[in-house]
Structures are given as C-alpha cells and as structure tokens.
Amino acid sequence: MKTVISRRTRCTNALAAALLASLCATAGAQETTPASDAVFLLDSVPTDAPAVMSVQGSVRQSNAPAKQAHVTIRDSAGKLVVSGATGGAGEFTIYGLAQGAYALVASRDGAVTRRPLFYSGTRLIVNLALPNPPAEHRLAALAAPAPPTPPPVASPAPFYYISDRHVEPYTDVTHAFDERDRAHPDQIYYGSVNGATITPGPTQNVADFLKLVNDTNRAQERQSSLLIVVTGFNNDFADGVSAASDFLDFPGSVVLFSWPSKHGVILPIHSDPSSYFNDETDNNWATADFRNLLRALVEDPNAPQSVSVVAHSMGTRLVSDGFAYLHGLYPNAAPPHRFDQVIVAAGDVDSDVFAQQAVPAILSLANRLTIYRHSADGALGLSVAIHGHSRLGRDNGDFPLAWPPAVNIIEASIFDCPSMNHSYWTASTTVHKDIEATLLDVDIADASRAAYLALAPTSTSLYAFASLPNGRDGQCTIGTDFLPNE
C-alpha cells in the first residue's frame, strides 16, 4: 500500500488518487500512477511557475532500502517546503514542486545525508545513501527505538563562478544562460553563488576576481588554495552549479568555469547530432577565456598559492588547450606559480592527441595528472563514432599504452551510472570520494585508496575500482569487478 503525505496532512488512498490526477493534469503529465511507494503532495501547484517538476528518489542504508527515513526539502531561503517519510521500499515522489534550488535532507537512526537540488526541467531522479547508524544509536535503539530529530538545513556554502555566458544582469541560478555574449566577445563574468542567488562581481576583470578570492580566503581563515571545476557537454549554468556544489568540502575556494554548453539534449543523439556539434563550437569559443584564466593563475601575484583543476567530458578540451598554451609561454622556465592536481573524468578528447600534446604540457606545470575513464561510457561511444578514434574517457582498443610516472589512469567500469555511464564523476559516491582524496594529495598507494583500487597487470599507471560489494553506490549500481589489461 502506498503512503501519501501532504505538507501538513496524511491522506487516504482515494483522496490521494484524486489529488494526484488533478495535479498531473495541471503539470501536463502523462502518468497517473506514481512510481514510488510514498507520495508527497504539495498544498498547491504554483500557477505562475514556468513548469512544475516532480522529484523521484530512493534512500538506502546498509545496502538496503531505508524504510521510514525522514525526508525534508527546503528552499534556498531555508523555508520548509515539504516533509515526510519514505515508504516500505525506501522511496518517495514529490509532485508539484516549482522549478528552483532546494536542499534535500534524509535521515534515519541518527545518520544524515544532504544534497542540494538545482533543477530547471520537469522531472528529477535522485538516489541517496545514508551512512551506517552510529554505534551508540544502534545500542540505544535496541532498548527504546525513537524517531530521529530532523537536523536543521544549512544554506549551501557560497562558491564562485567565472563564465563567458551572458550571465548579467540576472541573479537567479535557474535562468537559462545558454548563449555566448556576442556583443562583448572579450567579456568574462564572475561572481559568487549562494543557493540559487547569483551575486555578480563589482568588475569583470580576472585580476580583481583573484583578489576577491584571496581576500575571502584570508577573511574566512581558509587555505590559500583554489579548485576550478570545468563542466562538459550538455551542461547549462544550473548543471554546473550543481556539480561545483559537490566539491564544497574542498579546503580552499571552489570556482565553476561555465562555458556556453546547452542543456536538455535527449541521449542518445544518433538521429540528430547537431546539439553535440553546437556544443563543440561553443567549447571552441571559450578557449581564449580559459587560457586567460590559467595564465592569470600562474602570473598574478594575487593568485592562490595552490590551484587544482577538475574537468569533465568536453570540458577536458579546454584543459588540454589551456595547458598547451601555457607550456608555449614557458617552454624552458617555470612560471611564478604551479598547479597541484589536474583531474579529468570522461574526457571527450582524442586520447592520442591528449597523450602527445597535453600530457607533457600539464606535467610541466602541475604535480600530477589523474584520468578517470569508463569502458561503457555511452556518450563517449557516440563521440568515438563521430570522430573515429578513442576518447580519453573511453578505451576503444587504440588507447595509448605508455604514460609518464606522474599520470594515473583509473577505470570506473564497475559502476553502472545515469546518463549512459557518463556522469559517474559525481553520481558515484566512491568515484567522487576518490577524486576528493586525489585533490587532498592522498597517494594512490595509500591504504585508504588501495582498499578499492587495483593495479592492472603489467602496468604502472592503470588502476581500476575493484573489490567493492555489489549494490547501490550513490546514484549508481556496482557490478562485477573490471580489471583491464594494459
């Protein structure tokens, strides 16, 4: 039997069916039966919203459905939007949620997990994994079980953006910032993001932006370090905000570099690849701006002392070009500042070209390069079909064999993830934690990483996620160990 919860009242199945039918008609939905066993019905559907979205999710704990897990969603101002509990299968569905930015919290038995939601479509699927209950809670629960007290939801921590999209004069993350600023081709915008609110910088000068970051780090007594997150194909500004917010545990400042990629492409794109080619063109547009940012980071005296880069998908092309450009400026001498970690995941760039041109340039300017790839990345499979050669994020049988000692390649094919296995860098809890460990300079041979990474036979640089229990891993599913030969 399905459990149906409104914001304030618990409804009967008959009333829930009537409300649900009315609600789906208002939203233009085709379904009349929810997919999960707990349904959250908001008191009213906002009539002035451009669209109404549904959020379907599941909560698991100890590799099992988390029945009666407490779920709350608050808006960017911290106001409670909906609250209730998961059903018997650990699932929930929310109907009638206006587009925007929210914070989702799930808790059970003293364990808590949080996730920011930034969404501008009509349906979002989210899977949450709760940590195991604290030992003291498990012992207490044996004597007198009690429902957990929902924790307060903190506002998302602010971070920065720098973009050649036409961001101003808007102040809302969910606005569609798809287009280049053709009227000002040399213009670059920067500012901060806090929840769903954008605060533009006082000027549009990269040097002033770096001074702002350093001043903020000093005021907050944070490390003088910077992480640049570069998103890829089919990612709009809101998608980039969501990805960058996953790295807010980084000890320094987080900066989203958002180039004018579009959003809303339905994969696969066999029948109409024009959206892919449009993104390729806009990616080329952004190369000069990304070059200028990297140059400022190694030359400007206000630049943070330590800078790392994480790039995904087509964003890897900007990293490849940008470091090759810097290497050309400093072919024989070290620049004033070096980079720490360069990490690329699901890289949509020719693997041979990257190995021959980008790797020497990156290693001349950074301490280490880490490459994550997936042999069943469907989006890169389409790219291979278009370009005819292996992509950095997917071996098509002609992947380069020799890599320098400062390069680690990590195969993530054990994970079955959304978006045709292209989103594992944030969708898989294990992959994301490994990226975070790399950013903190945790050696790949350290016991904390060696517990789940195995070195491929006859290789000194190729690793694979292995020895993980089957089941859920964030939004992904763990399957059979995959250990490639080099």
Image (spheres, rainbow, N blue to C red):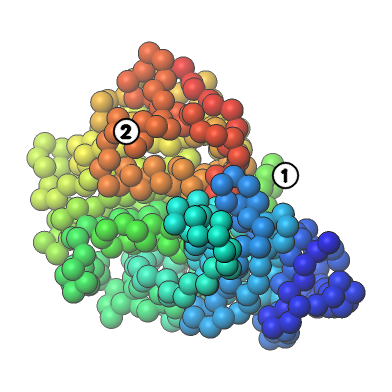
Classify mark 1: helix, strand or loop: loop
Residue beneath the point at 45% across and 42% down: 431
Q: Is residue 349 visible?
A: no
From the top left corner, tell me how far across and down residue 131 is, in percent.
49, 52
Q: CA distance from mark 1 to mark 2?
A: 47 Å
Q: Is residue 60 left or right of residue 91?
A: left
From the top left corner, tell me how far across and down residue 180 is, in percent.
46, 65
From the top left corner, tell me how far across and down residue 29 is, in percent.
81, 68
Quarter residue 413 falls in: top right
Classify mark 2: helix, strand or loop: helix
Residue 338 vs 149, above or below: the answer is above
The numbered mark, 1 or 2, whose residue comes first in the sequence reads 1
Which residue is label 1 attached to?
271
Residue 50 vs 403, above or below: the answer is below
Which residue is label 2 attached to?
447
Q: Are marks 1 and 2 in contact (CB under 8 Å)?
A: no
Q: Is residue 371 visible?
A: yes
Residue 424: which disc? none
Q: How many marks?
A: 2
Residue beneath the point at 18% across and 68% down: 221
Q: Name the residue type under label 2.
A: Ala
Q: Name the residue type under label 1.
A: Ser
Q: Is residue 110 left or right of residue 264?
A: left
